Image (cartoon, rainbow, N blue to C red):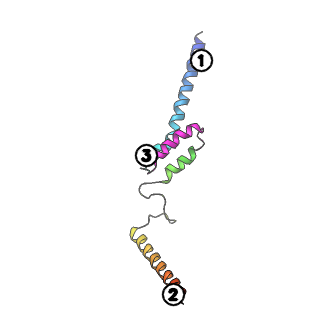
Amino acid sequence: MFLDYFALGVLVFVVVTLFYAVIAIHDIPHLIAKERNHPHQDAIHIAGWVSLFTLHAIWPFLFIWATLYREDRGWGIRPDGKLPEKAEADAEIANLRARIAELEAQAAGKEIA
């Protein structure tokens, strides 16, 4: 008789532990997003709860989404792995604007001729 109750207690313990383990695992992307100050951390949290109903089928995508963003570098880095400098980016934007103005002037000159 004692072994029956002991087995029932072990079964209840295992079920409750598995239940809480699944809940804890589903929340890992949200914890990562919160730690990285992700701009979409609320959406990641909600999607984590939705992933419970999809048997965690979308969980890997949430994990990737949460880990893509870092507060110090944003969404991505340059191919050489360095952060872009603001002056460098401003210079490139100025060059592109000048090139656009040049092409627009050429297009306007061709239309008149």
Which residue type does callout 3 highlight? Answer: Lys
Task: Locate residue 87: give its quadrant.
Answer: bottom left
Disc number for residue 7: 1
Tell me the element at label 1.
helix
Q: Main secondary structure of the magenta part?
A: helix
Circle 1: is it few (<14), some (14-19), or many (20+) Cα within 10 Å? few
Task: Locate residue 12: give its quadrant.
Answer: top right
Disc number for residue 34: 3
| Residue in the picture at 53% in, 26% down | 16
Which one is in front, 76 or 108? 108
Q: How many marks?
A: 3
Tell me the element at label 2.
helix
Asked if residue 86 lies left or right of residue 47, the reply is: left
Could you say where residue 4 lies in the image, as x and y percent from the top left? 60, 13
In this rendering, the label closer to the viewer, 2 or 3: 2
Quadrant for the N terminus, please.
top right
Which residue type does callout 2 highlight? Answer: Gly
Q: Is residue 102 above or below residue 10?
A: below
Q: Say which residue label 2 marks.
A: 109
| Residue in the picture at 58% in, 44% down | 58
Circle 2: is it few (<14), some (14-19), or many (20+) Cα within 10 Å? few
| Among numbered discs 1 and 2, the one appearing first in the sequence | 1
The range drawn in magenta is 39-57
Which one is in front, 21 or 42? 42
